Image (tube, rainbow, N blue to C red):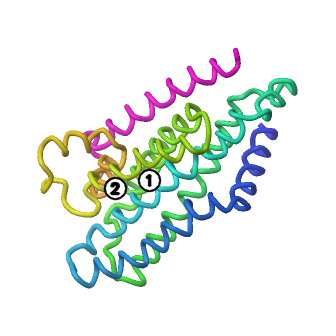
């Protein structure tokens, strides 16, 4: 347990020193929040009711899809993986450390958005904080799961960037955070339901723990875990 906690601590500190992770976990999401939060609250006063949820979904999606996979590619596509195997360090520990470190970073970023939106833009705070944080945590884990799959299956950073953008951009455009998903054609609404962002927004805007909004995130998390386990087995045998 001490070794695991130490590994998480080391990964968290490495993420803080990684320029790419600082940009995707904090800088870009918070700048987007300040810019778009001002626009939304000025032009659409009603958006204050869901401003926190919209900005949290954007920030988590960016961090999970564009930031979380990068350290995994650094390990699993280089000689570092062999060093782990030779040293007897299980490869799953790399994924666990990266997942929990990302979860801490994204939770901190989401908390900054929540407090900032309330004080700067007068956004409406969640009526049921416990339900909100529970739904947010599940959404973060589901998004990190997808990001982990991207990191383990990408052969290099160039392809990772392409794959991450293919997941991130539709998540934002079809997830209902920029404009109501009901305005989209039914075909695009169906496509949007594939991404965690859609269900993360629905789950965090509900004032109670509604299973109808949570079960898609649970399914996403379960499928990601199975896919990651298969890929880790393949790496251990390679």
Task: Measuring from the top left, give residue 118's x and y in whole percent.
Answer: 39, 78
Q: Nearer the viewer, residue 37 or 65?
A: 65
Query: What secondary structure is marked by label 1?
Result: helix
Task: Measuring from the top left, give residue 113's x and y in whole percent.
Answer: 46, 70
**Side of 83 where 213 appears, left or right:** left
Residue corresponding to mark 2: 172
**Side of 10 where 215 appears, left or right:** left
- Residue at the location (58% across, 44% down)? 69
Query: What secondary structure is marked by label 2?
Result: helix
Task: Measuring from the top left, give residue 237's x and y in whole percent.
Answer: 70, 14
Please check the rendered image and state whether residue 174 is part of the magenta-colored stretch, yes or no: no
Residue most extreme to the front: 158
Where is residue 218, by image quadrant?
top left
In which quadrant is the C terminus drawn?
top right
Where is residue 99, by image quadrant?
top right
Q: Which residues are magenta?
A: 210-238
N-terminal-most mark, 1 or 2: 1
Look at the magenta stretch and give its main secondary structure.
Answer: helix
- Residue at the location (65% across, 36% down)? 95
Q: Nearer the viewer, residue 119 or 191?
A: 191
Mark 1–mark 2 distance (CA, rounded to whole Å): 8 Å
**Side of 32 where 228 appears, left or right:** right
Q: Are the residues tagged 1 and 2 within 8 Å (C-beta)?
A: yes
Residue corresponding to mark 1: 61
Task: Measuring from the top left, give residue 90's x and y in whole percent.
Answer: 75, 27
Q: Nearer the viewer, residue 208 or 205?
A: 205
């Amino acid at each position: 347990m001490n070794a695991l906690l130490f590994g998480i601590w080391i990964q968290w500190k490495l993420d803080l020193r990684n320029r790419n992770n600082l940009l995707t976990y904090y800088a870009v999401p918070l700048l987007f929040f300040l810019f778009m939060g001002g626009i939304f609250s000025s032009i659409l006063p009603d958006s204050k009711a869901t401003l926190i949820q919209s900005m949290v979904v954007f920030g988590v999606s960016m961090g999970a899809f564009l930031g979380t996979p990068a350290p995994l590619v650094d390990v699993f596509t280089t000689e570092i993986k062999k060093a782990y195997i030779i040293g007897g360090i299980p490869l799953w520990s790399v994924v666990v450390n990266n997942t929990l470190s990302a979860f801490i970073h994204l939770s901190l970023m989401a908390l900054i958005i929540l407090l900032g939106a309330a004080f700067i833009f007068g956004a409406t705070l969640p009526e049921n904080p416990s339900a909100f944080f529970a739904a947010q945590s599940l959404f973060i884990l589901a998004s990190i799961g997808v990001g982990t799959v991207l990191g383990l299956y990408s052969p290099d950073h160039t392809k990772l960037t392409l794959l991450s953008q293919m997941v991130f951009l539709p998540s934002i455009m079809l997830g209902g955070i920029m404009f109501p998903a009901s305005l989209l054609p039914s075909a695009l609404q169906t496509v949007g339901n594939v991404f965690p962002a859609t269900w993360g927004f629905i789950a965090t805007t509900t004032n109670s723990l509604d299973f109808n909004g949570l079960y898609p995130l649970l399914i996403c998390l379960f499928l990601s875990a199975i896919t990651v386990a298969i890929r880790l087995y393949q790496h251990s045998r390679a």
